Image (spheres, rainbow, N blue to C red):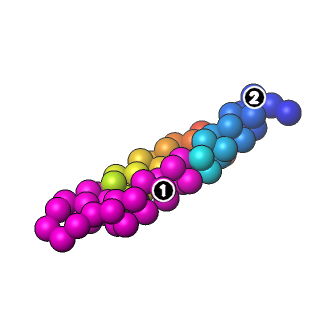
Amino acid sequence: MTITLIGLIIYFIFLFAFAIFSAFAVYHLFQFGYAGDLCRPVAIGYLVTAGVVILFTLILTLGSVV
């Protein structure tokens, strides 16, 4: 098993844990917010930012393997 493959496995484990954390965070933002607060825009901003970062790191990580 090469160091690159080990790194990819660790990266995907991190992504899985990050997805679970993000799901709880977004759930709580939508569940416990009240009318007029900024929970909904913050949740959407968080999802967009996290998605862009994950997509960018996936492109960099998988691009370095190929």
Residue at 68% x, 37% y is 10
Q: Which mark is residue 3?
A: 2
Residue at 54% x, 54% y is 19
Q: Which mark is residue 56?
A: none
Query: Of marks 2 and 1, which one's residue comes earlier in the chain?
Result: 2
Which of 34 and 38 lies nearest the eye of the viewer? 34
Q: Is residue 17 left or right of residue 8?
A: left
The residue carrying mark 1 is 24
Q: Is residue 18 left or right of residue 5?
A: left
Q: Is 66 in the magenta?
A: no
Q: Range of the magenta residues? A: 18-45
Quarter holding the C terminus is top right
| Type of amino acid at the residue the image marks with label 1 | Phe
Residue at 80% x, 31% y is 2
Disc number lying in front (2 or 1): 1
Q: Is residue 22 left or right of residue 39?
A: right
Q: Is 37 in the magenta?
A: yes
